Image (cartoon, rainbow, N blue to C red):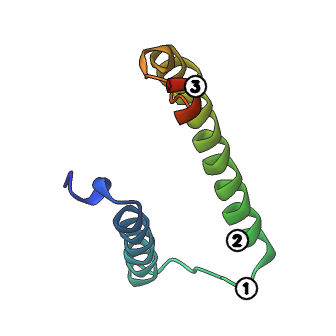
Amino acid sequence: MGAIFQSLGKTITAGVVLLIVLLIILVAMGAKVALGEHGWWLFAMRWLHVTAGVMWIGLLWYFNFVQTPSMPRFPTRRSRRSAR
């Protein structure tokens, strides 16, 4: 299971496959999935918006609290002229 999350492409593919499987299960159970209705698209766009917001906040948290404190430990590159 952990191998799926090692690659961005595999993770996105797994998410799309999971979505398709869930839609098939809903249709098989008799639920009406009306992809042409306005309400369904409102729900889908709201879900996408919330997911993008969670990902954005996660990236901000990573860069501010995880990445920034470890930046001073990395050696800086000096140009070849100043090294002589």
Judging depth in this view, the residue of 68 and 2 nearest the camera is 68
Q: Is residue 84 above or below residue 80?
A: above
Label 2–label 1 contact, CB within 8 A:
yes
Do the residues bearing badges 2 and 3 touch, measured as CB atoms within 8 Å? no
Name the disc covering residue 78, or none.
none
Numbered label attached to residue 82:
3
Q: Which residue is mark 2?
A: 40
Mark 1 surroundings: few (<14), some (14-19) or many (≥20) residues within 10 A: few
Residue extending furthest toward the front? 84
Q: Quadrant of the N terminus?
A: bottom left
Where residue 79 appears, x then y in whole percent? 56, 33
Left or right of 44, for residue 13: left
Q: CA distance from mark 2 to mark 3?
A: 62 Å
Q: Nearer the viewer, mark 1 or mark 3?
A: 3
In terms of secondary structure, where does tag 1 sit? loop
- Which residue bears the numbered disc 1? 36
Name the spot of residue 16 as percent of width and height, x first. 44, 72
Q: Closest to the observer: 52 or 62?
A: 62
Residue at 40%, 68% (x, y): give it. Answer: 9
- Residue 54's place in the image compared with 76, above or below, is below
The residue type indicated by label 3 comes to: Ser
Q: Amino acid at mark 1?
A: Gly
